[in-house]
Image: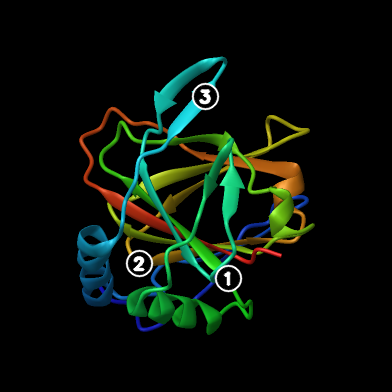
Amino acid sequence: MNSLFPSKKIVFDLPDAIIGYYPNLFDKTEADTIFNELLQTTLWQQDEITLFGKTHPQPRLTALYGNDGKPYSYSHITMQPHPWSLLLHKIKHKIKTVVDTNFTSVLLNLYRDGKDSNGWHADNEKELGENPVIASVSFGAERSFHLQHNLDKNCKQKIILEHGSLLIMEGTTQHFWKHQIAKTAKPIGPRINLTFRLIK
């Protein structure tokens, strides 16, 4: 069901964080079209990651698009950006209607099913600057986004990331909180997540 208020914002009252959520920045029809185009046209890759001395295929597919000369590094992986596509430009423009940031890159993640995941981490790489603004758009199957405070392990938040939704993390969020998309045993369809970043 399409909302009459696509820009309605939910703000989470969490210490040391500024987190806002727009459940339906894109209505279902538009979100369906975007999901299908991204699934078919994105230049997906699967990198290797090393954890505790063992190397494994990353449990999701990724792609980086953005401004020329703005690579992005995380978990000992350095990605070089593909040029912006027209669709990614359109999505970025829609996000700019609610958060006034000139994002220079977008990291796309394809979670093929419930076995694909993204472990506990913060988006605190030095090239993102001191208090980065991260805009996260989701298309496809809903997944649970878990947050946990670094100092108070009982301070937690779970957000269901809906089809066509936008999550904004800013301020000191990345200093004090970590987040994850956990594996799930439930049968679940694919999800595409786009995290827009400003690389300094």
Say which element carries label 3.
strand
Decide: few, some or many residues near mark 2? Use Cα within 10 Å; few <14, some 14-19, many ≥20: many
Q: Which residue is more in the foreground, 85 or 12?
A: 85
How much space separates mark 3 and mark 1, taking CA atoms? 27 Å
Looking at the picture, how far across and down is residue 195, in whole percent? 50, 59
Does residue 7 show up? no
Looking at the picture, how far across and down is residue 14, in whole percent? 70, 51
Circles 2 and 1 in contact, beta carbons < 8 Å: no
Residue placed under numbered mark 2 in the picture: 164
Q: Earlier in the sequence, mark 3 or mark 2?
A: 3
Decide: few, some or many residues near mark 1? Use Cα within 10 Å; few <14, some 14-19, many ≥20: some
Q: Residue at x 58, y 53 (%)?
A: 72
Q: Which label was assigned to residue 104?
A: 1
Residue placed under numbered mark 3 in the picture: 50
**Amino acid on which disc 2 is placed:** Gly
> Which image quarter is the C terminus in?
bottom right
Which mark lies nearer to you, 3 or 2? 3
Q: Is residue 19 left or right of residue 25?
A: right
In the rendered image, which quarter is residue 164 located in? bottom left
How much space separates mark 2 and mark 1, taking CA atoms? 21 Å
Q: Earlier in the sequence, mark 3 or mark 1?
A: 3
Residue closest to the far front:
69
Q: Which residue is more in the foreground, 122 or 144?
A: 122
Q: Is residue 10 left or right of residue 83?
A: right
Does residue 82 show up? yes
Q: Residue at x 62, y 58 (%)?
A: 12
**Amino acid on which disc 3 is placed:** Thr
Q: Earlier in the sequence, mark 2 or mark 1?
A: 1
Q: Residue at x 25, y 48 (%)?
A: 190
Q: Residue at x 53, y 66 (%)?
A: 105
The number of numbered discs placed on residues in the rendered structure image is 3
